[in-house]
Image (cartoon, rainbow, N blue to C red):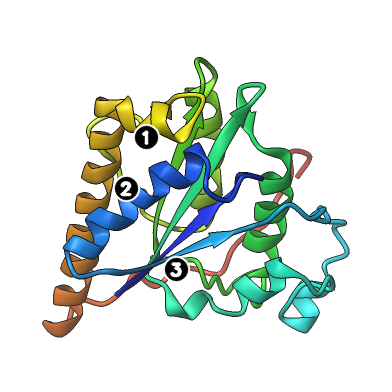
């Protein structure tokens, strides 16, 4: 069992990393391996809707998005972390995730994300956390990914990592999230051993609002 934690902050070891590390520590304590992947400071190309990934099986842009998407089979869960910018996730992270979640599927009807556990955490100085939290959760709910919850919305508050560590409820929420994800991963593994299979999804029907 392995969980990918995506650090969407431009600061590698800032407040978002502090929150993700608390989640990772809780997962590790429960026997789940983790990897924190930092998206970095370089410019991240947004999706250009060329749909070549549906033909090639990967994004046309050869960067960290393609690298991480090629490793999806390694992980049973994904936790996305972001700072809050103007009541939303960081723009570079959104560009990363748009391409990651779209090009990560080998075709429109075969999702590599389906049935993986998903969760997000947000870090803010004061306000806008729940709006950013809502935006990130939408990536999971369009990919047949069960969302793992915690005792409160997954947010920490502070302007520095030291501030975040003083947010005792926020840090506890991160630990509880890790506990809950570890529990569900173990339930899924136990279910497989007794013949509980992953759901089989119908081929997607695409429509629009005029037909």
Q: Quadrant of residue 94?
A: top right
Residues tagged 1 and 2 counted as in contact (Cβ below 8 A):
no
Whole-Å distance between the Cαs marked 3 and 1?
A: 29 Å
Verify CB contact (< 8 Å) between mark 3 and mark 1. Answer: no
Report the Cα–Cα distance between label 3 and label 2: 34 Å
Q: Earlier in the sequence, mark 3 or mark 1?
A: 1
Q: Helix or strand or loop: what does disc 1 sit on?
A: loop
At x 19%, y 70%, the residue is: 31
The residue closer to the viewer here, 207 or 69, is: 69
Q: Residue at x 52, y 48 (%)?
A: 13
User: How many residues crowd mark 2 within 10 Å: few (<14), some (14–19), many (20+)?
Assistant: many
Label 3, on which residue? 201
Q: Position of residue 139 (x, y in %)?
A: 55, 49
Crowd rating for badge 1 (residues with CA inside 10 Å; few <14, some 14–19, many 20+) = many
Residue, x 20% and y 80% (percent of image)?
A: 192
Q: How far across and how far down the image is residue 21, in percent?
A: 37, 51
| Residue 34 location, quadrant | bottom left
Label 2 sits on a secondary structure element that is: helix
Q: Report the residue marked by disc 2.
A: 22
Q: Which residue is mark 1?
A: 154
Reply above or below: 145 against 210: below
> Taking the image as drawn, is residue 181 in sight?
no
* Dot 3 or dot 2, earlier in sequence: 2
Location of residue 145 in the rendering, given as x and y in whole percent from the top left corner: 42, 57
Left or right: residue 60 compared with residue 18: right
Choose mark 3 or mark 2, whichever is in front.
2
In this rendering, which labeled residue sits more in front, label 3 or label 1?
A: 1
Q: Residues within 10 Å of mark 3 (few under 14, many from 20)?
A: few
Say if 157 sits above or below 93 in the image: above
The quarter of the picture where the N terminus appears is bottom left
Q: Is residue 5 visible?
A: yes
- Residue in the image at 70% along x and 68% along y: 64
């Amino acid at each position: 069992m392995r969980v990918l934690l995506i650090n969407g902050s431009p600061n590698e070891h800032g407040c978002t990393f502090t929150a993700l590390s608390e989640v990772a520590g809780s997962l590790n304590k429960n026997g789940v391996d983790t990897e924190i992947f930092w998206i970095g400071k370089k410019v991240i190309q947004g999706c250009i809707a060329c749909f070549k990934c549906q033909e090639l099986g990967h994004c046309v842009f050869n960067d960290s998005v393609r690298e991480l998407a090629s490793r999806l089979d390694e992980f049973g869960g994904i936790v996305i972390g972001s700072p809050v910018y103007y009541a939303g996730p960081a723009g570079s992270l959104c560009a990363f995730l748009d391409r990651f979640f779209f090009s990560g599927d080998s075709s429109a009807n075969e999702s590599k994300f389906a049935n993986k556990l998903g969760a997000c955490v947000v870090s803010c100085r004061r306000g806008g956390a729940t709006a950013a939290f809502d935006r990130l959760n939408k990536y999971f709910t369009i990919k047949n990914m069960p969302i793992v919850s915690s005792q409160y919305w997954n947010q920490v508050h502070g302007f520095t990592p030291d501030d975040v560590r003083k947010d005792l409820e926020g840090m506890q929420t991160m630990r509880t999230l890790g506990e809950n994800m570890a529990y569900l991963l173990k339930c899924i593994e136990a279910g497989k051993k007794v013949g509980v299979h992953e759901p089989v999804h119908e081929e997607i029907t695409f429509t629009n609002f005029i037909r």
